Image: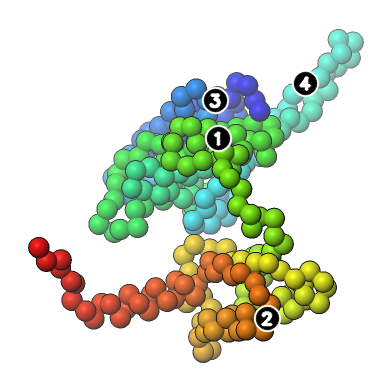
Amino acid sequence: MMAAASACIQDGSLLVNGKTLLTRVPFNVKVSPVESAAAFFFGATSSIPSSFLLGFFRKLACEIPMETQMHLLEVKEKSALCDGYSLPLFTEKTFYVLLLPVLEGSFRATLQGARSNELQICVESGDANVQTTNVSEVVFMNSGDNPFKLIKDSIKILENHMGTFKHIDNKKVPGHLDWFGWCTWDAFYKDVNPQGIKEGLERFKEGGCPLRFLIIDDGWQETYNDFQKEGEPFVEGSQVHKFHKRKLWIKICICLAWFTWLLGRAASVLRNYEEIQPKD
């Protein structure tokens, strides 16, 4: 890791280790150091609740999707090598900058890009009636020359600073991590479907590698009825449950739209009932 990481906003630009990371940074964006660590927090105020502009990338910010929970940047800088007898040779030195949205009070944050290559922070509570126009430690920023060590060290810094969670090094490792399992994301991305999962499970079994657990993952947080394509019937969860009846005997962790769909259906039903008030 870099021993002397530094960040500041100068003449409307965010500088990290002397390199320009963002331009046209608004005056309402602030950078504050993390105590006893060479890392920083972004804070900002805004007249529009839950919407904050960080600044502009020179390019590609428009490709940052909504709900981005971590952004790792590769920064190259030229350095001169000289032996004292010949002209200096310039080589590129690489370091990395981590932007990590975090929780602040009742609010969560994510990053997102806009067409004009501006980088934005979206801050929300999950309740339309609970909003804010002021955040002070909503995006964590750190830098280093090893991306893997950078991420690990950054999580440990946040662990000490926030005191709300523990790094995996300080947790008891659950036994199921020693099991052989399969996550559908790499195989299907957003096109995960029951038939494809069934075929994948059968191939594992035929290959002599039966699974102990399965993670069905479409990769996105906000998904509503994602499996119900236009003009097609809804995919019933019982189709996945049939895997168990066929003695595949795997433990399933479902983290996609079926659960969201069920919640949506339940919410639509509950709207027909009056709110129940507790009695003294």
Does the image show residue 23?
no
Residue 38's disc is 3
Q: Nearer the viewer, mark 3 or mark 4?
A: 3
Residue type at tag 4? Ala
In terms of sequence position, does the residue under pointer 3 or pointer 4 come before the other? Answer: 3
Residue type at tag 2? Lys
Q: From this view, report whether residue 56 is shown above or below residue 130.
A: above
Q: Residue at x 79, y 69 (%)?
A: 209
Tell me, yes or no, whether the two marked residues, 2 and 4, touch with CB atoms within 8 Å.
no
The crowd level at tag 2 (other Cα within 10 Å; few <14, some 14-19, many 20+) is few
- Spatial distance from mark 2 to mark 4, Cα to Cα? 64 Å
Q: Residue at x 36, y 52 (%)?
A: 124
- Left or right, 107 with respect to 57, comes to left
Residue 150: x and y, percent? 63, 35
Residue 280: x and y, percent? 9, 63
Q: Residue at x 52, y 53 (%)?
A: 68
* Screen quadrant of the N terminus: top right
In terms of sequence position, does the residue under pointer 2 or pointer 4 come before the other? Answer: 4
Tell me, yes or no, whether the two marked residues, 4 and 1, touch with CB atoms within 8 Å.
no
Q: Residue furthest left?
A: 280
- Spatial distance from mark 1 to mark 3, Cα to Cα? 12 Å
- Left or right, 162 with respect to 198, comes to left
Q: Nearer the viewer, mark 2 or mark 1?
A: 2
Tell me, yes or no, whether the two marked residues, 2 and 3, touch with CB atoms within 8 Å.
no
Q: Label 3, secondary structure: give it.
A: loop
Q: Label 2, secondary structure: give it.
A: loop
- Spatial distance from mark 2 to mark 3, Cα to Cα? 53 Å
Residue type at tag 1? Lys
Q: From this view, report whether residue 193 is shown above or below residue 69.
A: below
The residue pinned by badge 1 equals 156
Residue 80's disc is 4
